[in-house]
Amino acid sequence: MLNRRLIRIKSFKVLFSAVGSGSDSLTSAEKELMMSCEKTRDLYYFLLNISGSIVRIAQERIDAGRSKFTPSALESNPNKKFVENKFCKLLEEDEDFVRFCNRKGLHWGEHDVFLKKVYNSVIASDYYSEYMNSSENSFEEDCNLFMRIFEEEFEDNDALENILEDLSLYWIDDLAYVLNVIIKNIEITKIKKKLVHPNVFLKDDDREFAQRLLSQSLLKYDEYMKLISENVSNWDSDRLVSTDCTLIVMGIAEAVYFPNIPIKVTINEYVELSKYYSTPNSRIFVNGLLDKIIQKKVADGEVVKIGRGLFEGNESEKI
């Protein structure tokens, strides 16, 4: 489930926290990293489980209309297409999905106010009207509806972000990525007629990548910090931005200990992270210094890459 960029982000956060707290416990850091990775999959199931909760709100509205003393014709004979959505039925009947959510407590029962706001937003949309008025009644159409719901209703949703932040410190930065995975997996479900149950990592060697990246960055932190200080002109090491230093340390560790990852990829990845987790000028600093240090290590034989094109770096910028 987690791609390499998200693994780098999680490793960066754990490393930054460990260094900031003065902790040098590799065991504790690795445990924290694995917990953070597991929490991303929990968020996937938690968000996916909102589907049935929205349908429940719709069913409650139908039941309330029917129970009126004098229901209208529409209330007496409601359109039940949404509450009979086949994608939601699939979730409801998938034993692994239900078991996982129950075991982890990934339910929306305490958030009825939010659920009703989402439902009201959904039923006011054009895509919902088109769905309800369509003569088609297929599993594919039902999947398409929930793909639209996840696309339209949850990105940049302040209320949802507040809920996630209250429930888990690990979740807030994962939201956009997890929503994208959900939409892609509903597309697969639409074709295979079977719910996708993602593993924590996309590939088998990604767990090893995560653990090794963090461990080598933590073990070599002081050594690489010294390198950073030695390669920065006219700057006192105490004045360096701590997030920049952490990203550069990780970039050096990745270049040294992962021979199959091209240098250009490594540099570009940490420059991208600097745009979100450091200062406005950090991308220039991280790009230039990381390239400078890695190229020195290439010349010294400490960075050895396997395959064509793996030695390409960026043009260094003066620090």
Image (spheres, grey):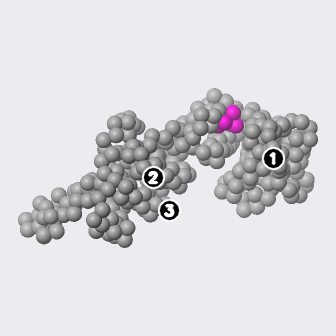
Give yes or no for residue 166 being in the magenta stretch: no
Give the residue type that dot 3 points to: Asp
- Residue linked to disc 2: 187
Mark 2 to mark 1 CA distance (whole Å) = 35 Å
Q: Which residue does the image show at 26% across and 56% down from the upper left?
A: 83
The quadrant the N terminus occupies is top right
Q: Based on the displayed image, in which of its 4 quarters is residue 135 positioned?
A: bottom left
Give the residue type that dot 1 points to: Gly
Q: Give the range drawn in magenta.
A: 209-213
- Inspect this view and state whether residue 55 appears: no
- Residue linked to disc 3: 156
Q: In this view, does 228 lie to the left or right of 49?
A: right
Which numbered circle lies on residue 309? 1
Label 3's element?
loop
Label 1's element?
loop
- Inspect this view and state whether residue 48 appears: yes
Q: Which residue does the image show at 66% across and 57% down from the upper left?
A: 276
Q: Callout 2: few (<14), some (14-19), or many (20+) C-alpha neighbours within 10 Å?
A: some
Q: Based on the displayed image, in which of its 4 quarters is residue 15 positioned?
A: top right
Q: Is the magenta stretch mostly helix, strand or loop?
A: helix
Of the two numbered discs 2 and 1 on the same chain, state the one appearing first in sequence. 2
Q: Which residue does the image show at 31% across and 44% down from the upper left?
A: 92
Give yes or no for residue 210 being in the magenta stretch: yes
Q: In this view, does 41 lie to the left or right of 218?
A: left
Give the residue type that dot 2 points to: Glu
Q: Which of marks 3 and 1 is in front?
A: 1
Mark 3 to mark 1 CA distance (whole Å) = 38 Å
Q: Is residue 240 left or right of residue 129?
A: right
Label 2's element?
helix
Nearer to the camera, 83 or 279: 83
Q: Which residue does the image show at 23% across and 56% down from the upper left?
A: 59
